[in-house]
Amino acid sequence: MRPLCDDPCVSDDVQALITRVQEQERRLVLPGFTHDDAWALGTLLVGMARERGLPVTVDITRGQQQLFHAALEGTAAHNDVWIARKVATVRELGTSSFLAGLQARARGEVFEDAPWIDAARMAGHGGAFPITVAGAGVVGTLTVSGLPQAEDHALAVEALEAFLAQL
């Protein structure tokens, strides 16, 4: 896993992180996304987390339907709350929750402080990544919760990269 930065993601060059995450979102596009794909991606990610002893909750959706959910040892109900908030951000903006937070930071703002954001419903913290299908756009989300936000994001990206490499 390659964290993008140390949590809470303070960087002298937030713009470089924004560019990197935007590149990830452009590159990580699937040819399709089925229930079986969600299962394969979810079990791949859970396997990676278990191998490393990471206390994470993993969630995968397509549209409004939850296709995969697993909570590993060391997680709690609040991880599900974080997942819901991160997923709402991806659904609203069509970008990763990490990118949303970074873009606010680049403007000198806190994502959740924006007047149009319901902070109880949305979060600009890393961990939810859009599942994008070629020719269709964003169709779902892959979300990790339980680690510092940059690590949640990095684990989701690493799993999606590994999944794409298997196709």
Image (cartoon, rainbow, N blue to C red):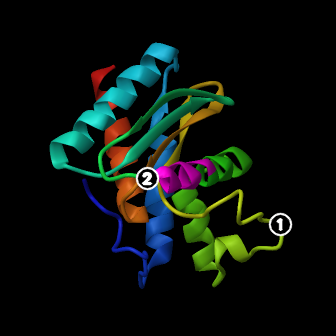
Give, as a single range, the part of the protein colored magenta: 76-84
Tag 2 residue: 76
Is 83 inside the magenta-drawn segment? yes
**For the residue carrying disc 2, how many other residues have a C-alpha within 10 Å: few (<14), some (14-19), or many (20+)?**
some
Q: Main secondary structure of the magenta part?
A: helix
All told, the count of numbered labels is 2
Asked if residue 140 is positioned above or below residue 130 in the image, the reply reads above
Tag 1 residue: 116
In the figure, is residue 154 to the left or right of 135? Answer: left
Q: Amino acid at mark 1?
A: Trp
Asked if residue 83 is positioned above or below residue 5 in the image, the reply reads above
Specify whether residue 164 is in view. no
In the figure, is residue 126 to the left or right of 89? Answer: left
Location of residue 154 in the rendering, given as x and y in whole percent from the top left corner: 35, 54
Location of residue 45 in the rendering, given as x and y in whole percent from the top left corner: 32, 36
The image quarter in which residue 50 lies:
top left
Q: Residue at x 51, y 56 (%)?
A: 78
Is 113 inside the magenta-drawn segment? no
Q: Nearer the viewer, residue 79 or 138?
A: 79
